[in-house]
């Protein structure tokens, strides 16, 4: 078991939840528009930026003139800033936490080197820390790049965001299966809002961006759908529940909006309003299958709630979970087993099945300790189990990465922390 700096005891909830919550703004949107704003020279009017640590780290480093840029544990910040610094000619050393320096970045660095950027690994080949050297955009070697589409959409977004600033633009060819496609489409939609038009051919998996200027604009960031997912889980597990979550749009750019459809399977009905949406209990299915290729950040929430609700969920598209803040597949398996549940691999690296808790275990949760592996989503996905019994969350401070007010919001919903 990991050693964490603190733990949080959550007493069993009464089971009745009725509240109004405004989850944090999307850090995915925030981090993208912050890079776009930097490429306009800081001329945009950005509203409702996320207070998540990842976004606050991005803001701090974009303002910094330091050579050493420490992203802490922010994957998007590491990848977006690497491309931003490399293409804008800024010399910098990119580093982060021990785990951040274990997360691969080779595909992005290889692509940037194809452009002509000079980037060196300071330690292990293929991983941060990185030393980024000066780059002259007029000496581009090749603006037609190929990159695998199945590893991380963040590599692809990092390249797309800087593409219009290149003298010849960029043609990006995505090889193989394309994962997290909605995140790529979000990037292109946000670029369009700021005046940059891309030509995406999804039959050939190519994206062409001509040289263009970003145009300063006003943009208000939507609430985060990943953060919303935990409230769907709470409604599903409560005996009586009605929660209004605010700041959401039915025509959202975020791929994780699909939680609305997934949650119908485990017993949550959603109704959109002019402020967001209302969540209420409905019937639960016995089993269903879902492909998480385009919404991997929802996998932990769904696995835990299905395990607790007695729903056998077959999950595919989990490949990228191995290289997140922790190996999320292994972490889920370890912690679900404490409740008699499991995430069983039935096809190597392709298909997993949630084996639910036995009925008697769902009624006997009594102070089990959840290791979070320095992963914010592990903490938030397992906390709703307090609706079934006392739980202990190790490393509760990790939620600051994406949802700093999570524990305070749980108190508003009647949780006793």
Image (cartoon, rainbow, N blue to C red):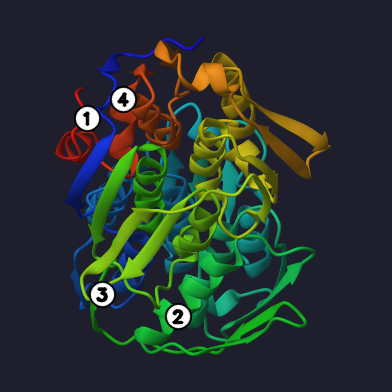
Mark 3 neighbour density, 10 Å: few (under 14) some (14–19) many (20 or more): few
Helix, strand or loop under label 3: loop
N-terminal of the two: label 4 or label 3? 3
N-terminal of the two: label 2 or label 1? 2
Residue that label 2 marks: 189
Residue that label 4 marks: 396
Confirm or deny contact between disc 4 and disc 1 (CB under 8 A).
Answer: no
x, y percent for residue 347:
84, 39
Residue depicted at x 31% and y 13%: 5
x, y percent for residue 265:
55, 53
Residue that label 3 marks: 41
Q: Is residue 332 above or below residue 271?
A: above
Residue that label 1 marks: 415
Q: Describe residue 135's horizontal placement relative to residue 47 as left or right.
A: right
N-terminal of the two: label 2 or label 4? 2
Residue depicted at x 35% and y 38%: 238
């Amino acid at each position: 078991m990991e050693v964490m700096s603190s733990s949080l005891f959550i007493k069993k909830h009464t089971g009745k939840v009725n509240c109004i919550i405004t989850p944090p703004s999307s850090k995915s949107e925030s981090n993208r528009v912050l890079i776009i704003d930097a490429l306009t020279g800081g001329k945009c009017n950005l509203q409702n930026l996320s207070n998540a640590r990842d976004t606050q780290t991005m803001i701090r480093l974009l303002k910094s003139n330091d050579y050493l840029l420490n992203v802490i544990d922010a994957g998007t910040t590491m990848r977006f800033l690497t491309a931003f610094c490399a293409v804008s000619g800024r010399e910098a050393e990119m580093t982060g936490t021990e785990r951040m320096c274990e997360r691969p970045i080779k595909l992005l660095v290889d692509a940037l080197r194809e452009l002509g950027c000079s980037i060196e690994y300071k330690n292990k080949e293929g991983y941060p820390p990185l030393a980024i050297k000066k780059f002259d955009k007029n000496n581009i070697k090749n603006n037609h790049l190929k990159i695998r589409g199945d590893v991380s959409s963040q590599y692809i977004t990092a390249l797309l965001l800087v593409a219009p600033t290149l003298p010849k633009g960029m043609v990006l060819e995505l090889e193989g299966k394309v994962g997290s496609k909605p995140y790529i489409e979000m990037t292109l939609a946000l670029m369009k809002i700021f005046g940059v038009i891309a030509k995406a051919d999804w039959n050939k998996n190519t994206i062409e961006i001509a040289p263009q200027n970003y145009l300063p604009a006003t943009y208000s960031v939507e609430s985060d759908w990943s953060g919303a997912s935990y409230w769907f889980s709470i409604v599903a597990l409560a005996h009586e529940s009605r929660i209004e979550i605010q700041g959401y749009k039915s025509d959202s750019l975020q791929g994780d909006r699909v939680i609305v459809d997934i949650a119908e399977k485990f017993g949550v009905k959603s109704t959109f309003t002019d402020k967001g949406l209302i969540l209420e209990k409905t019937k639960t299915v016995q089993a269903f299958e879902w492909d998480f290729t385009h919404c991997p950040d929802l996998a932990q929430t769904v696995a835990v709630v299905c395990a607790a609700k007695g729903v056998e969920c077959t999950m595919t598209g989990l490949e990228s979970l191995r290289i997140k803040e922790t190996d999320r597949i292994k972490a889920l398996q370890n912690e679900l087993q404490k409740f008699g549940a499991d995430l069983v691999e039935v096809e190597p690296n392709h298909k997993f099945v949630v084996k639910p808790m036995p009925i008697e275990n769902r009624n006997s949760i009594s102070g089990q300790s959840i290791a979070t592996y320095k992963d914010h989503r592990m903490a938030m996905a397992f906390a709703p189990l307090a609706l079934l019994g006392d739980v202990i969350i190790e490393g509760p401070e990790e939620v600051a990465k994406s949802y700093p007010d999570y524990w305070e919001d749980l108190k508003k919903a009647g949780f006793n922390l």
